[in-house]
Each structure stands twice: as C-alpha cells, then as structure tokens.
Image: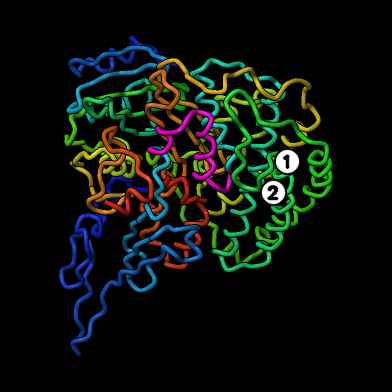
Amino acid sequence: MLPDETVVRTTLSGVTQAEVSTSTLGVVVRIPADDASSALAALKASSLDFIMLVDLLGTDTGEEVEITYHLRSLTRDEDLYVKCVLPYEGVLHSVWNVYASALLPERETAELFGLTLAGHPNPARLLTVDDTEPLLRRSVAIRTLEEVRDR
Amino acid sequence: MTDPRDTVLTHALQAEGTYDSGKAPAGIRRIPRGVDGLATEHLVVNIGPQHPSTHGVLRLVVELDGEEIMNAEVAVGYLHRGIEKLGEHRRYHQLGTLMDRGDYVSGIHGELAAALATEQLLEVEVPAKAQWLRSLMSEINRVASHLVWYGTFGLDCGAMGQFLYAVRDRENLLDILEAVSGQRMMFNYVRPGGVVADLPADAEQKLRTFLRTIDGYLEEHDALLGGNEIFQKRVRGVGAIDRTTALSFGLTGANLRCTGVPYDVRRDKPYAAYEELQFDVPLGSTGDAWDRYLVRMEEMRQAVRMIRQCIDGLPEGDVMAKVPKVLRPPAGEVYACVESPRGELGVHLLSDGSDTPYRFHYRAPSLFAMQVLEEILPGQLLADAIMLIGSVDVVLGEIDR
C-alpha cells in the first residue's frame, strides 16, 4: 500500500527541501542527509505510524552514495522510502536513536561504501577486515582469485 | 522493559573497542578487593566462531560476572562472500543461484524473492501452476528448515533424541525437493517467469507417502521436546522480547509474531498462491523462548496444511511464462519480499536497463534477529545464551552474505 503523499509532505514540513514523489518503488522522499534523523523521527511519531525501519541500504549512483531508509507502518500497511545522498568519503550520521534496527545495517553500509559512521555506539567494521576497499563502490572491480593473489 | 536504546549505550565493550581489565569501562561494576588482596573480576569470553552451538560461524563476545552475562557483542563476517557485489555482475537469471547460498537452509525462499523482484521490473505474468508450485516448494522447504531449527534448538538446551527424529523427517523432505528440482539444498528451481520444471510423478508419490505420517510425527516431536519438563524449565520466561523492542529492532517472522504482532508477509502482502490458500498465523503473547518454540511448531503444522492444499488443488497448465533468454528489464527500482522461515526476506533491485542489476540488495531477516541478541543477553546466564541463539533461529549465511 502507498502512503498519502500529502500527509507525508505535511509531516515533513519542518524539513526544507523534502521532495515527495512516486516511482516504481513506491512513495519516495528525498531529503538532505543532515536532516535524516529528524525527518525519520517526525515520520515515526506522526499519524502515519512508521514504527519499523525494515531496511537500510546504500547505492553508488556514480557520483555519490545514496542511502535508502525503508520504513513501514504495520497498522496502516504502508511502506515509505526515504532517500538522501552523501559524497564519497562522506559522514553517515547514525539514526539508531530513532530506529535501533539501523545499528548493524549502518555499520555494513559505511564499510562497504567507504563512509565514516558518526554518532554510532560501535562504529567498527562489520563484515570485512581492516583496509578492505569499499567493495560496493562501482569503481571497485570484481576480481578472480588469481588476480587477488597476484596483487 | 526499559528503552532499548539505554542498553545499547551501556555496551562498554563496544564503546571502548577493546577490554582492559585494569581499567573498568564506564557502566561496569567493579568488585572491591578483599582483605587478603585477592579480587574477582569480569571475564571476557569468546564463544565461536567455530563453536557448534553458534549455528555456523557466529562469534559472540560476552563479558561475564561469574555465570551472569554483563555485556554481549555479536561479531560476524566470517562467511562474507560479497553476494551483493557478485549479483551486480550476474544476469537476472543467475541471481537465484546466489540467493540459494545466502540462507542455505531455505533456498527456495531466497530464489523466490529474487524472481519476484525481477518479475516486478519486467511486469511478467506468472502462470497459475507455477504460482502454486512456488507455494508448495516454499512450504516443503519451510518444514525442512524448521526441523533443522527444532533439532538444533533441542541440542542447545541439552537434549539429544529429537535431533535424530528431526533429521529423519528432513531427509524425506530433501528427497522430495531433490526429486522436483534435482538438488537437495541449492535448488535453483524458481526462475524469473515461473519455475524450472513441473512436479514429476515420483515426487508426488513421495510427497503423498510423507503426508500420511507427518501429522503424527509432528505431534511426536512436540511431545518429545515441548513435553519435556527440563526443556520447559530452560525456556519458559527466558529471553522475553516485548513488542516495542521487537519492532524497533526490525524483527520479522516468528520472532515478531511470538510477541503478539500479527504480521506475516504471506497474508499481508500475498505472493505466489498464498491468496488462495487457507492458513492461520500463530501468535505468541509473552515473547519468550517458549513462545518462539510454540509459534514455530504451529507454523510447521500450518505448512503441512498448505502442502496438502497445494498438492490437491494444483492447477493444470504451463510452469513458465514466455520470457527472453537474456533479461533486460526497463530501468527502475523495486522491492519484493517473501516470508522465509526466518522472517521477511527481501530483495531490492535497481535496474539501469542492462542485462545485469545496477544494485542488488538482500534484506536478511537473520541480521535483524541477531542484533536483538545484544539487547536480550545482558542479565542472562551463560548457559541461556546458547539456548537464546538457538531460539531466534539465525542462519549466518544470510547475515554475512
């Protein structure tokens, strides 16, 4: 189910430059990265009742890293996607104060896209060892075992 | 229960990075030195990554005061294969093969999520028979997966017999899955557009034979473990998760339903043939390990109920829609999810119109189930930690991806 765009817009009236649109994914809100925590808190507390952060993922758009927060309301059976962009080597501000489920996905996203994690209780790497390249960047090539050995 | 965020803040081990017994991190109680100069101190123990009770390669760092856990931190990544990165260099048909190796205990569900996402991008209509076969195989796989959980959960609690019985029944199910797909675990059966093959006659025969005995066996399983007083004493009232915590940590599946939240993807966002199948969504009330046990046991009975409906109501027709050999979906972004035995398994696909996905993301339910361990373990006994890892039913293959 798709949430009402107008209600989403009203809820985020405190966030300047919030853009609401509908795509193949569903209703997508684009916000400045600095407002992520406050925007998510507003959406969670609003009548839209986005009680769950279902998922958090990064995408390398070729110019910057796009972070997608997937929110869900169980009472209204609606999903909402909040997106913001960060520069490469940018700082990802943790939203675990709003949604505790962001704790591990944020660590994973930060290490795999080469971002710095701020405001997180344990900003350590999750999946890879120190000095691993940011693997999910488009510029990092996929290599065969032989190529890895020859490096 | 307190605010979940408070507990995370007191994770002294995480905040400090390393543990130094000479310097007590904030929030940890120091025991004063006795008159003879001797003192007790907290002990940091690594459980895993190769311990049999960690269900794969989970490493749990626990800080102990005697037998009691003060802090717990989960350390993962020992099985990281870069499935998401590999997916960006594979064609859409090949995503299922990767998903099989994520949650390797219930491969059908992973394949199905990838196929659903691809079909959403392509806007393909899947034939009715394929939809029913998808549901049938999903439910067979769900019982097989829950039997692994049932057997190993008993082992974690110190029981042995139930594991042998669970493996006996799972073998029969794997034989059926093999007869249909050709593989015991890495099926590659569900493809974008439908399924790869019709149900062969010998598989149907095996399934009907299996269905003659399974009801009695499930009751036997329940009586053997659930009817055991020692087991009940181990799990009742231990590791309770309340609704707020469950939702804020993103739990799904049986881990969420045991707290009384009625959310099931099969019912609330129907896919495959679930709209036409009759089934109940079992709910718990207290959210403890005993409720998680009861919910999963009932899920097996409901799955068997659905297998019967699927095999009796299987429509005639094709099992594969007309799809090109090389898929080039139009540009767009989609999310598709299924109810895997561990919860909501989702696939997030971003297409740029080429023959490989631009971004392929795997929402692993176990990842979210596992982070709640850091929340519920403090205050428990070390022996219960092993039981609680078993009770949330995580598969490390999909956590590390």
Q: Is residue B362 above or below residue B174?
A: above
Mark 2 or mark 1, which has the lower sequence index?
Answer: 2
Image quadrant of residue B301? top right
Horizontal and vertical percent position of residue B69: 36, 65
Image quadrant of residue B202? top right
Tell me the amino acid under the disc marked 2.
Leu
Residue B345 appears anywhere in the view: yes
**Rendered residue at 50%/36% (across/down):** B345
Label 2: which secondary element = helix
Q: Label 2 belongs to which residue?
A: B174
Q: Nearer the viewer, residue B93 or A119?
A: B93
Q: Which chain carries label 2?
A: B
Horizontal and vertical percent position of residue A113: 26, 38
Q: Nearer the viewer, residue A8 or B142?
A: B142
> In the rendered view, does A87 fall on the left or right side of B129?
left
> In the rendered view, does B170 fall on the left or right side of B101?
right
Magenta residues (range): B85-106
